[in-house]
Amino acid sequence: IQMTQSPSTLSASVGDRVSITCRASHSVNRWLAWYQQRPGKAPNLLIYKASSLQTGVPSRFSGSGSGTEFTLTINSLQPDDFATYYCQQYSNSSVTFGQGTKVDIQ
Amino acid sequence: QVQLQESGPGLVKPSETLSLTCTVSGASISSSGYFWAWVRQPPGKGLEWIATLFYSGTTYYNPSLKSRVTISVDAAKNQFSLKLTSATAADTAVYYCARPRTIAVADDPFDVWGQGTMVTVSS
């Protein structure tokens, strides 16, 4: 299953509300996760099952969608949120990731 | 708290075998009930799942890499390993070991990651 994210890059300011879209080539039901990755660091799980917030993740992060289209929304962007975000489908044992969306400072 | 640490050569020659080990601390590979996985990331690119295994021997491989990859567990050392044969420059990447978040579920998001180790394939 191919995962396509848009946009590839997103420029925003502190306090902005931003949204990232992830589309799957086939339905993944709600088996969709989102990660944040800062430069030189391992990915950090934010959202699983499309909209469930991982323990310890701030509530300004939210996820929505089902089937083939999903959205990650960050409310009131904070300085720590400038990073690259990846979606991942896990509807079968062959998990796949999107190509990433870099959120940088406008 | 579970921690993962990758180790292995940082430089591999083309056509040789890339071998890495992940040492697990804070949990037992054999009794925790979790699966364990490898993920890689070429420089400046996205994430690619490589393989997932259970201590009992159940394995799942990325179809695009399956012919070259072997993963295994050493329960006595609380480690699991990755071998990738016939390495090429395209295998140059940061290699992460990771753990799916739910006990006994292989296809699950990864909530625990190692720090990653850079492997360069070059003569």
Image: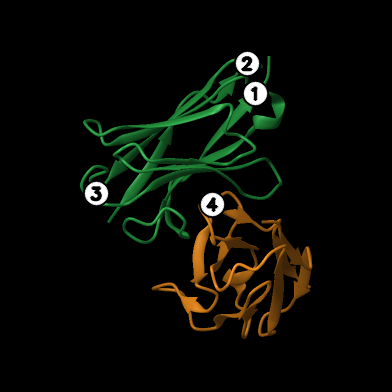
Chain colours: A orange, B green
Q: How crowded is the residue under tag 1: few (<14 C-alpha within 10 Å), some, or many (20+)?
A: many
Measured in 3D between alpha carbons, the distance from the residue under mark 1 to the one under mark 4, in whole angstroms, is 21 Å
Mark 2 or mark 1: whose residue is earlier in sequence: 2
What chain is tagged by disc 4? A
Measured in 3D between alpha carbons, the distance from the residue under mark 4 to the one under mark 3, in whole angstroms, is 22 Å
Query: In the rendered view, would you say A65 is above or below A27?
Result: below
x, y percent for residue B72: 38, 31
Secondary structure under badge 3?
loop
x, y percent for residue B33: 26, 52
Secondary structure under badge 1?
strand
| Point 55% across, 19% down: residue | B17
Q: Are marks 4 and 2 on the same chain?
A: no
Measured in 3D between alpha carbons, the distance from the residue under mark 4 to the one under mark 2, in whole angstroms, is 26 Å
Contact between labelled residues 3 and 1, with CB atoms less than 8 Å apart: no
Q: Amino acid at mark 2?
A: Lys
Mark 1 or mark 4, whichever is nearer to me: 1
Secondary structure under badge 2?
loop
Q: Which of the 4 quarters of the picture holds residue B67?
A: top right
Q: Which residue is mark 2?
A: B13
Give the label on residue B27, or none: 3
Q: Which residue is mark 1?
A: B121
x, y percent for residue A101: 71, 63
| Point 58% across, 49% down: residue | A40
Give the label on residue A41, or none: 4
Q: Amino acid at mark 4?
A: Lys
